[in-house]
Image (cartoon, rainbow, N blue to C red):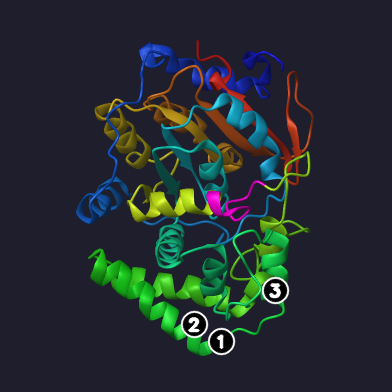
Amino acid sequence: MPSRRAFCAIPILALCFSALVGGAATRAAGKLPAQLSDGEFWSLVSNFSEPNGSFRSDNLLSNEIRFQFVIPELIDLAKPGRVDMGVGPEQNFTYIAAVKPAIAFIVDIRRGNLDLHLMYKALFELSADRAEFVSRLFSRSRPDDLTSTSTPAQIFAAYVRTEPSRELYERNLTEMEDLLAARHNFALSADDRRGVEYVYNAFFTFGPGFQYSSTDGQGATYQPTYVDLMVATDANGRTRGFLSSEESFAYVKDLETRNLIVPVVGNFAGQKAIRALAAYLKQQNATVSAFYLSNVEQYLRLQRAWNTFCTNVATLPLDDTSTFIRAGHGGRVARGTALTAELGLMAVEVEGCGLR
C-alpha cells in the first residue's frame, strides 16, 4: 500500500489542514458516552445547530454510485471506536457501518436533512431487521420469503414487486411521530413534524426507484436509484452498504437506539456548528476518525468560504490517522492513490495532506 502521505490528491488541502498539527496527534478517545439520554441528544441537536440554510435540492438521496470504493482503504486507515462525521443523506450509514465509531455526527446546511435523519432514526429503532426496515421505508408489505441471509439484491427485488400501501404509510408515520415526540420526548417544532412527513411521503411516492432529483432539485445526468445504491459494491464487487448484512444494519440500529447518531444543522463555513462540535469532542477527549465531505468544497470555493471552513476544521480533535473522504469532479490526481467515483474522483485524504 502506498504511504499515507501519498494519498494527498489536491495540493490546497495541504495548506488547509497543516494548521491541524497543534498537538492533536496525541489525542485519544476514552470518555465518549456509551449512550445519550433523550434530553442530552436533543440538547446537542439544538445547541450545536445553526439557522436553516439552503441548497439547490432536497438531497434526500445520494447520487454517488461508487462511494463504497474507498471503504477497503478507509477501514485500514480510520480507527474504530472514535467519532465519525459526515454530510448528506443515507451514505453516512454505510461509512458508519464500515468505520464502526462510538458516536457519529451528521452536519448539513439544511434543516430538511435533520428531518430526514430523524425519520431514519425512527425507522431504525422501529425495525427488527433489514427486511422490516425496507418495508417501513417504502410502506410496502413484507414479502414472506425474505430472511436474515437475503442479499440486498434479493430484498429489493422482492419490494420492487410489492405495491405501496397507504394504510401502512399512515400507520408507520404515526408510529414514527409517536416514537420521536412521545417516547423520546424530542421538542419537535411544527416545521420539523411537517419536514419528517414530507420526507417520508417522498419515499412512499417514489418507492425503490427514488432518485436524487425525484423531489425538488437538480442533479447530474445519471442518477442512481435507491435500489442501485443499496446493491452497489466496492471495486472488488463486495457489497458494503448498511443494508448489505444484518450485522451492518444492527450496528447502525444500535447507535441510533442509544441516541449516538446526532444530526446537526450546520454550514461547513458557519460560525457555530463545527466549532461547537469540536469543543464538545475535546471535552470528551475524543478524536475524529473519519469525516465524509462529499463535494461540499465545490460550493465553499464558489462562495469564497474555503478559508473559513479550514479554520473550523482546524478546531476539531484530529490525529495522524484521521481520514477525510471527498468527492471531486473530473481530472486526475497529482500523485498517490484515488478511486474513480461517479462524480469524478473519490479520494481518501489521509492526515489532512500534511497533518504531521
Q: Tell me the magenta residue range.
A: 240-247
Name the secondary structure under disc 3.
Answer: helix
Q: Residues within 10 Å of mark 3 (few under 14, many from 20)?
A: some
- Which tag, 3 or 2, sits closer to the chain's start? 3
Q: Which residue corresponds to mark 1?
A: 165
Residue 36 lies left or right of residue 333; in this view the side is left
Q: Residue at x 38, y 72 (%)?
A: 176
Q: Which residue corresponds to mark 3?
A: 158
Q: Nearer the viewer, residue 114 or 262?
A: 262
Residue 78 lies left or right of residue 118; in this view the side is right
Q: Which residue corresponds to mark 2?
A: 169
Q: Residue at x 47, y 48 (%)?
A: 251
Q: Nearer the viewer, residue 276 or 154?
A: 154
Query: Total label count?
Result: 3
The percent position of residue 324, horizontal first and vertical second, equals 55, 30
Q: Quadrant of the N terminus?
A: top right
Residue 313 lies left or right of residue 248; in this view the side is left
Three-letter code, disc 2: Tyr
Against 153, residue 242 (above or below) is above
> Which mark is drawn over residue 287?
none
Against 250, residue 292 (above or below) is above
Q: Residues within 10 Å of mark 1 (few under 14, many from 20)?
A: some
Assess whether residue 82 is covered by the magenta stretch.
no
The percent position of residue 247, horizontal first and vertical second, equals 54, 49
In this view, which residue lies farthest toward the bottom?
167
Q: Residue at x 24, y 71 (%)?
A: 182
Name the secondary structure under disc 1.
Answer: loop
Q: Quadrant of residue 268?
A: top left
Question: Would you say residue 225 is visible in this rendering?
Answer: no
Three-letter code, disc 1: Ser
Residues under numbered marks 1 and 2 in contact, where contact means CB atoms less than 8 Å apart: yes
